[in-house]
Image (cartoon, helix red, strand yellow):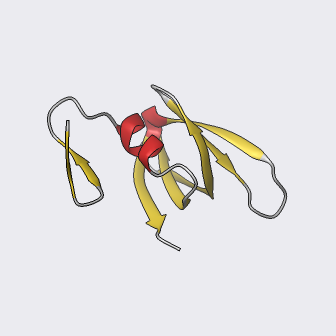
């Protein structure tokens, strides 16, 4: 894969690659379960694997492991 600005581009780039690239950034992730159940999770990306991302709550330090399969939208804060 190549890069364009700060983005990873090209064939074969996986969502997990993008999540790794934004490690340390604050994000809000929306998940869709079933036909109409949305769940939002937010935190700092502290790790990512082939099919998961780890979010750390900046206030409590609690870690949440999220499955990428149900992930629909990711908002990334550049701050």
In the rendered image, which quarter contains the N terminus? Answer: top left
Task: From this view, report whether residue 24 is shown above or below residue 11.
Answer: below
Q: Residue furthest left?
A: 11
Q: Quadrant of residue 24?
A: bottom right
Which residue sits at x=51%, y=55%? Answer: 29
Which residue sits at x=41%, y=35%? Answer: 16
- What percent of the width, then of the height, locates residue 60? 85, 58
- What percent of the width, then of the height, locates residue 32? 46, 46
Q: Residue furthest bottom?
A: 79
Task: From this view, report whether residue 3 is shown above or below residue 52.
Answer: below
Q: Quadrant of residue 50?
A: top left
In front here: 16 or 30? 16
Question: Is 53 positioned to the left or the right of 2 in the image?
Answer: right
Q: Residue furthest top?
A: 50
In front here: 6 or 75? 6
Query: Can residue 34 be seen by looking at this rendering?
Result: no
Question: Is 9 positioned to the left or the right of 57 in the image?
Answer: left
- What percent of the width, then of the height, locates residue 63? 74, 44
Which residue sits at x=45%, y=44%? Answer: 19
- What percent of the width, then of the height, locates residue 5? 23, 60
Which residue sits at x=47%, y=35%? Answer: 68
Q: Residue furthest right?
A: 60
Q: How many marks do you count on the picture? A: 0
Question: Is 79 positioned to the left or the right of 10 in the image?
Answer: right
Question: Is 55 positioned to the left or the right of 10 in the image?
Answer: right
Query: Can residue 60 be seen by looking at this rendering?
Result: yes
């Amino acid at each position: 894969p190549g890069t364009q600005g700060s983005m990873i581009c090209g064939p074969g780039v996986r969502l997990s690659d993008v999540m790794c690239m934004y490690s340390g950034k604050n994000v809000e992730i929306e998940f869709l379960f079933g036909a109409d159940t949305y769940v939002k999770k937010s935190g700092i990306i502290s790790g990512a694997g082939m099919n998961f991302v780890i979010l750390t709550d900046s206030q409590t330090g609690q870690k949440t492991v999220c499955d990428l399969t149900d992930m629909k939208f990711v908002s990334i804060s550049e701050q």
